[in-house]
Image (cartoon, rainbow, N blue to C red):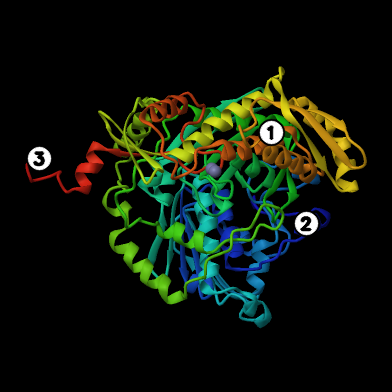
């Protein structure tokens, strides 16, 4: 019986909404998803000129009989769905029946396919059958799409640069590889390898194929579950971050989704461990009962709707926070100055897909390199791409134990070791030592972290400690500000302020909480009042408290160039060690950097042949 059925018209129209072949990556996406649906374990994508000239997808899937091969190009054909009801319980990837027909209508297509018996070759041009013949019996399908948009010049013009087209495809293929570590993927452009995964069903190995071994060393394995959700995956240590959000990848029941709320939860879980405008590398597999998720919110946007979303968000947030909290996060000094950037990543970081739905500040994309640059890079990567030498190995099991070891090593180390101050550079950086090596502490950032945790704790605690002001402080406001403040007075009184109205549009402050910076009380109070007025529109107490704590912490901190005594250094180090997160200031900058004995020897070229003296 033919596997491909004609969907009924209503269903096809419903799904078709918004689905058009827009760019090379949408063609790749359709073809590769068909290959996955056909049960392929190997999928090879070969591009010429970023796919504008040719896109060839070869798989080892089930293949098609002659009838199906012809039917595949008719509109509304699909092997997936037959009734509207199925739409709500979609477990498979493909559900848009007319993709192949749309692609065929704007290109030249050759389809070679076989179920293992007699093969079929079909050639179409502009959607019309040109030729049909018998092919060889190799099981699987090869589709070659040439001269995309040759008959729609307007669309052709609409394509971005070759560089951008390729970047879209790489980003898509990377995500797909991460969501299917059990499938072997290959991607090439003009004969140059870009991506190659081994299909051994090891997510960490796939991450390494995409981001490189240096990133993998800094990934933490995570998992969590409750009655409805099972989550597992890998998250980067906070020191590894990117300018783009595109490296936070969530896979729901095997399907890549792009949900801005989930991304925000993931990023917020790293708050104060890294700068807020940089984003971690995260790959999370979320499994749940398909009836709890509506995947058909928007077929092209890849978004989904969860029915127990708050629960999921909490679960993810707790999982990431506790994973980070248990790590030694002191970054090792980066000795190798020529930072190796993976080709893959280079594309993705230079070409950013604008994320319109988010209000967070946009990262300005760097100038796009010209296409010539890509070719050069490709050649370079081909020459010394790590997977050919060390990462990529046919013997995956040996490789994986190596990776697992690396991760384990990280887990064993303590949170923050004991350190002994040796001196200070420029009244700014405290030099410390212990048996493992040398540490540099930024004294302002360290003190800021300590203050931040103290203030934040005081703000969160029920019992407020307040002291009277030596000279009660009067604050004059505009009438507008005065109204806002009066409406939000409880925020201030809960903090421990005792405030009274004092004539027209004025307030008098009689008592203030004890954690206000000494000798800077007046400035601090004014700042807090500003924050209340500013934040009034979308007030969130925990975010507000965080902001107050970070602002106060900075004001109370030692400035750079302030000379402190050895005793003060010791106190600072001890206080820092007691912090929940001793590694970053509240703004996400590092407080401490580590030079291991080995790093120092390497820097002075003492390791190796020469005897140490
Ligand atoms: Zn500061
Ligand atoms: Zn800071």
Disc 3 versus disc 2: nearer the observer: 3
Q: Are marks 2 and 1 in contact (CB under 8 Å)?
A: no
Position above or below: 362 against 453? below
Residue 123 x %, y %: 56, 73
The quadrant where residue 338 appears: bottom left
* Other-residue count near label 2 (Cα within 10 Å), few / some / many at <14 / 14–19 / ≥20: many
Q: Is residue 137 left or right of residue 338?
A: right
Disc 2 versus disc 1: nearer the observer: 1
Mark 1–mark 3 distance (CA, rounded to whole Å): 53 Å
Q: Earlier in the sequence, mark 3 or mark 2?
A: 2
Judged from the image, the secondary structure of the residue bearing numbered disc 1 is: helix
Disc 1 versus disc 3: nearer the observer: 1
Residue 12 image label: 2
Residue 416 x %, y %: 40, 27
Judged from the image, the secondary structure of the residue bearing numbered disc 2 is: helix
Judged from the image, the secondary structure of the residue bearing numbered disc 3 is: loop
Position above or below: 167 against 554? below
Q: Earlier in the sequence, mark 1 or mark 3?
A: 1
* Other-residue count near label 1 (Cα within 10 Å), few / some / many at <14 / 14–19 / ≥20: many
Q: Earlier in the sequence, mark 2 or mark 1?
A: 2
Tag 3 residue: 612
Is the CB of mark 1 within 8 Å of ligand 2?
A: no
* Screen quadrant of the C terminus: top left
Tag 1 residue: 545
Extreme residue in the right direction: 504
Q: Judge by depth and name the residue closer to the eye, 97 or 366.
A: 366
Q: Quadrant of ligand 1?
A: top right
Extreme residue in the top direction: 463
Q: What residue sits 63% from the left and 29% below the top?
A: 456
């Amino acid at each position: 019986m033919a596997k491909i059925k004609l969907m009924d018209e209503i269903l096809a129209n419903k799904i078709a909404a918004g689905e058009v072949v827009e760019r090379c990556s949408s063609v790749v996406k359709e073809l590769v998803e068909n290959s996955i649906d056909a049960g392929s374990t190997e999928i090879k994508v070969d591009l010429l000129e970023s796919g504008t000239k040719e896109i060839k997808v070869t798989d080892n899937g089930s293949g098609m009989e002659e009838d199906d091969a012809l039917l595949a190009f008719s509109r509304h054909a699909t092997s997936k769905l037959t009734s509207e009801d199925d739409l709500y319980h979609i477990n498979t990837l493909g559900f848009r029946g007319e993709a192949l027909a749309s692609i065929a209508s704007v290109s030249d297509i050759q389809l070679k396919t076989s179920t293992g018996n007699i093969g079929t070759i079909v050639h179409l041009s502009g959607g019309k059958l040109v030729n049909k013949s018998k092919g060889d019996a190799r099981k699987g399908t090869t589709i070659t799409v040439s001269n995309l948009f040759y008959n729609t010049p307007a669309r052709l013009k609409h394509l971005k640069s070759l560089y951008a087209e390729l970047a879209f495809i790489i980003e898509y293929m990377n995500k797909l590889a991460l969501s299917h570590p059990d499938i072997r993927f290959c991607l090439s452009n003009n004969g140059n390898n870009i991506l190659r995964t081994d299909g051994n069903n090891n997510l960490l190995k796939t991450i390494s194929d995409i981001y490189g071994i240096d990133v993998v060393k800094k990934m933490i394995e995570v998992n969590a579950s409750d009655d409805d959700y099972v989550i597992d995956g890998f998250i980067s240590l906070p020191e590894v971050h990117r300018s783009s959000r595109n490296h936070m990848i969530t896979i729901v029941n095997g399907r890549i989704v792009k949900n801005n709320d989930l991304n925000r939860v993931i990023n917020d879980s790293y708050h104060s461990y890294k700068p807020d405008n940089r984003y971690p590398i995260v790959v999370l597999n979320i499994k749940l009962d398909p009836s709890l998720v509506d995947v058909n919110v928007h077929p092209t946007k890849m978004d989904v709707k969860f029915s127990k979303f708050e629960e999921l968000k909490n679960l993810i947030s707790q999982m990431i926070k506790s994973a980070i909290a248990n790590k030694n996060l002191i970054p090792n000094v980066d000795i190798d100055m020529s930072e190796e950037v993976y080709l893959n990543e280079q594309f993705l970081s230079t070409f950013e897909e604008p994320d319109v739905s988010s209000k967070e500040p946009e990262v300005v994309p760097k100038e796009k390199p010209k296409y010539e640059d890509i070719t050069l890079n490709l050649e370079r990567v081909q020459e010394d791409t790590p997977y050919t030498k060390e990462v990529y190995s046919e013997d995956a099991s040996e490789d994986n134990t190596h990776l697992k070891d690396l991760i384990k090593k990280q887990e064993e180390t303590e949170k923050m070791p004991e350190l002994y101050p040796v001196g200070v550079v420029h009244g700014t950086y405290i030099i410390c030592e212990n048996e493992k090596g040398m540490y540099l502490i930024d004294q302002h950032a360290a003190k800021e972290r300590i203050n931040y945790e103290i203030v934040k704790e005081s703000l969160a605690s029920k019992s407020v400690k307040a002291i009277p002001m030596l000279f009660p402080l009067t604050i004059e406001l505009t009438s507008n500000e005065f109204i806002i403040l009066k409406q939000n007075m409880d925020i201030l009184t809960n903090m421990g302020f005792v405030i009274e109205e004092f004539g027209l549009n004025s307030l008098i402050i009689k008592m203030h909480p004890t954690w206000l910076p000494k000798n800077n009380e007046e400035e601090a109070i004014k700042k807090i009042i500003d924050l209340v007025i500013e934040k009034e529109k979308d007030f969130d107490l925990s975010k507000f408290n965080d902001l107050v704590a970070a602002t106060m912490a900075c004001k109370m901190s030692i400035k750079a160039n302030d000379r402190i005594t050895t005793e003060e250094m010791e106190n600072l180090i001890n206080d820092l060690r007691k912090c929940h997160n001793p590694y970053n200031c509240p703004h996400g900058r590092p407080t401490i950097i580590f030079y291991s004995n080995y790093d120092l020897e390497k820097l002075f070229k003492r390791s190796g042949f020469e005897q140490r003296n």
